[in-house]
Image (cartoon, helix red, strand yellow):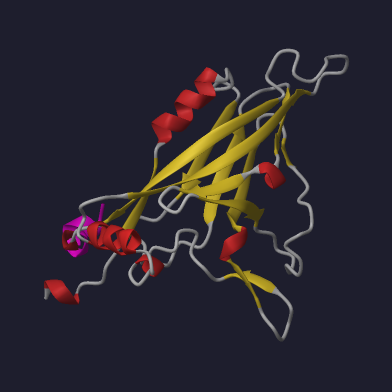
């Protein structure tokens, strides 16, 4: 029965690390960063992240500079450009992305993924996110022996994997007459690290599913 239970993984934001960076850059009272994640995922299920950027201030304009944001995979040392998901059909990934403004006392909700997650439909010419942000399954038969060993250890719950979102924020005063960056840093880089772990088979027990 245990062998019939599907393999599931869990993604956890290292929130304390994010909050500490906001404090160090003196914007903890002005900016909040959070993500919505499901309790469990299949190995290749997570293809995008739902992110929330809150502007807690009353007089600051917070911009998310998408073209300078990256997703970094720790074990492969990959650094990938972030693509914000939009309702428009994506036909060209090379088009510059306009920064998103988070107005005072408002929250930006945005789904994002990496450029590497997209594939192009040959018939329609449209790009869609069809690959996982972290391709764990590809490690199993990777030509590099160290990656195959890493996959085995991960699946045996002996180690975890990590990736991070390098979020670039630009902050400016909205009051007339004040020079941008005079009271707050004009640009902030916030590293949002996530830990990935293989869940034990006990996740499938009814009382654990309700948590």
Which residue is outermost to the front? 144
Residue 128 lies, in percent from the top left, at 63, 70
Which residue is outermost to the left? 1
Query: Left or right of 180: which side holds 198?
Result: left
- The N terminus, quarter of image: bottom left
Residues 145 and 197: in front is 145
Which residue is outermost to the right? 177
Residue 40 at least partly seen: no
Residue 27 lies, in percent from the top left, at 59, 21
Residue depicted at 36% across the width and 62% down the height: 41
Task: Report the span colored magenta.
Answer: 203-211
Residue depicted at 64% across the width and 36% down the height: 168
Residue 161 lies, in percent from the top left, at 35, 51
Residue 184 lies, in percent from the top left, at 68, 17
Residue depicted at 32% across the width and 58% down the height: 146
Residues 12 and 153: in front is 153
Query: Left or right of 47: which side holds 188?
Result: right
Q: Is residue 57 above or below residue 5?
A: above
Residue 181 is covered by the magenta coloring: no
Q: Is residue 207 above or below residue 138?
A: above
Dominant secondary structure of the residues highlighted in magenta in the image:
helix
Residues 131 and 49: in front is 131
Q: Is residue 181 above or below residue 51?
A: above
Residue depicted at 50% across the width and 59% down the height: 133
Q: Is residue 30 above or below residue 91?
A: above
Quadrant in the picture for residue 31: top right
Residue 22 at least partly seen: yes
């Amino acid at each position: 029965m245990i062998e019939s239970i599907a393999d599931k993984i869990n993604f956890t934001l290292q929130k304390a690390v994010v909050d500490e960076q906001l404090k160090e850059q003196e914007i903890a009272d002005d900016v909040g960063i959070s993500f919505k994640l499901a309790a469990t995922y299949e190995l290749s299920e997570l293809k995008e992240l739902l992110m929330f950027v809150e502007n807690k201030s009353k007089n600051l304009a917070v911009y998310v500079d998408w073209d300078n944001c990256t997703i970094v995979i720790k074990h492969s040392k990959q650094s990938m450009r972030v693509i914000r998901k939009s309702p428009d059909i994506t036909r060209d990934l090379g088009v510059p992305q306009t920064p998103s403004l988070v107005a005072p006392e408002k929250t930006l909700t945005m789904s994002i993924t990496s450029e590497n997650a997209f594939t192009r439909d040959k018939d329609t010419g449209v790009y869609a996110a069809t690959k996982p942000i972290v391709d764990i399954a590809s490690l199993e038969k990777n030509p590099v022996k160290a990656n195959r060993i890493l996959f085995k250890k991960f699946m045996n719950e002996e180690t975890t994997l990590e990736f991070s979102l390098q979020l670039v924020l630009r902050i400016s005063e909205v009051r007339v007459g004040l020079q941008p960056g005079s009271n707050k840093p004009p640009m902030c880089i916030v590293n949002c690290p996530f830990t990935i772990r293989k869940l034990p088979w006990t996740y499938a027990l009814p009382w654990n599913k309700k948590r």
